[in-house]
Amino acid sequence: MKDCRKFFIDGKWVAPVGQVRELGVVNPATEEQVGVISLGGPADVDLAVGAATRAFASYGESSVEARLALLRRIIELYSAKMDVMAETISLEMGAPGWLAKAAQAPAGLAHFVEIEKVLEKYEFEKLQGTTLMRKEPVGVCGLITPWNWPMNQIGCKVAPALAAGCTVVLKPSEIAPLSAYFFAEILEEAGVPAGVFNLVNGDGPTVGAALAGHKDLAMVSFTGSTRAGVSVATAAAPSVKRVTQELGGKSANIILEDADLAAAVKEGVQACFRNTGQSCDAPTRMLVPQSRMKEAAEAAKEAAEATRVADASAKGSIGPLSNAAQYEKVQRMIAAGVAEGAKLVTGGVGRPEGLAKGYFVRPTVFAEVRNDMTIAREEIFGPVLSIIGYEDEEDAVRIANDTVYGLSGYVTAGDVERARRVARRIRAGNVHVNGARIDFAGCFGGYKQSGNGREWGAAGLEEFLELKAIFGWAAGRMTP
């Protein structure tokens, strides 16, 4: 069992302040405890923010070359420890071994590699007429990250913060904290200056709230549910700190009439189920021509029933949900779909056959779903697909945009120009055309209740920068 009860503050591993509260970390595939952490409190947050504040005085003025050197040391060490990181992620949140090695662990590294490229060429100062436009680090930042893609979200926040010259306090999810602890050890080995990076474990209502409301933080970057995001923004408001949020999603996958329906449906099912459906940008609403609903349902049934569960080595297989509460939520959502009259094509409530323990769920497909049903409105965060029929292209766009969310979208068409036309009309922060995968040099973030601000690449770096105008920089001496 992994003992992760200390916090990393001011370059040292320290015990929590005051009475220690401990929390067991559970492997969702076995329901057995695999680690233990301490749950911090406001006093621990104060210590971490104080260390970050002191460190910012020098790190905020550090050279680009010094920050590049730090990023490169982190990249080198992370690369060397990739297999251990993958094993750690699999252990804490249940990602199958193949996915942890192919995507979960590499995603964290990818953000450091990309931000290194950005930092090498980024212009922090630019003369605009006689005015110098200067970009400076925003200051001390609180980073609150989720359990579903733990290192992806840590990487896409910590990498640009360090590149910008900010100092940080990280609160990872208490459900999947082991990878963050291991990451902190990597940064320690890389020689991160004392106080530049700090780690405090804890729950959202305690450590998360203390971070969001801390008067000495300049910014809080949060990834999680929309409900929790509202709480973070509310706590941050009195100090008028910058708040960036990547929240929930209910992404539409529009398959247009001229697409190869069978191939597009199969790909859509796989994308929806990847990471056991625990991705905020998962294409959980599949929109197909109403006239081809039966054909789409049959193709989706075939793809879902071919999805292997609890086979860590089989590419495309899915693991358990990350925790018991999430398992119960998904069961309730599946039951709601049946109760509201959606057609259950395959799957349903309960564990897959042959599995008596672990938070495993049955890959589930509903057809003949209306967009006002619960399963079409609410984020389920499990391998549950809703197939919705549309009459024409205009109707498809209307249904896709008829949601409080706006994180991602997907469009498949035989005519790429048609796909592009529809993609432009989707009210979402990122849209995938004809099966295109993510681009770490692009950006990630949402419209509406999916959040504000952007992560990844140059756009992600700029979230951690303030823009200053120095008037008269090139005007010469002023005369009275």
Image: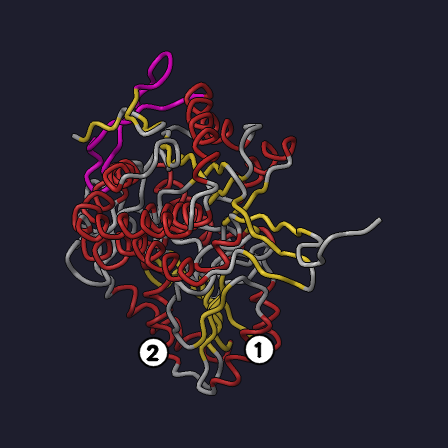
| Residue for badge 1 | 391
Q: Position of residue 160 (x, y in %)?
A: 43, 50
Judge whether residue 343 can be spotted in this image. no
Q: Quadrant of residue 44?
A: top left
In percent of width and height, residue 448 lies at: 61, 54
Toward which corner of the image does residue 231 lie, by quadrant? top right
Tell me the kind of residue under disc 1. Answer: Glu
**Residue under the image location 27 percent in, 36 percent down:** 188
Instruction: Say which label, 2 or 1, has the lower sequence index.
Output: 2
Crowd rating for badge 1 (residues with CA inside 10 Å; few <14, some 14–19, many 20+) = few
| Total count of labels | 2
Task: Give whichever of 134, 142 is nearer the camera.
Answer: 134
Q: Relative to 451, is 44 above or below?
A: above
The percent position of residue 241, horizontal first and vertical second, equals 60, 37
Nearest the viewer among 338 and 8 is: 8
Instruction: Tell me which segment is drawn in magenta.
Output: 15-41
Regarding residue 465, the answer to whether it shows in the image is yes
Quadrant in the picture for the N terminus: top left
Q: Is residue 63 left or right of residue 134?
A: left
Mark 2 or 1: in front is 2
Q: Residue at x 42, y 77 (%)?
A: 434
At mark 1, the secondary structure is loop
Residue type at mark 2?
Answer: Ala
Q: Is residue 435 above or below residue 39?
A: below
Q: CA distance from mark 2 to mark 1?
A: 21 Å
Q: Does residue 118 appear left or right of residue 401 in this picture? A: left
Query: On the image, numbered disc 2 is attached to which residue?
Result: 263
Residue depicted at 16% across the width and 61% down the height: 314
Q: Quadrant of residue 131?
A: bottom right
Q: Residue 28 magenta-drawn?
A: yes
**27 drawn magenta:** yes
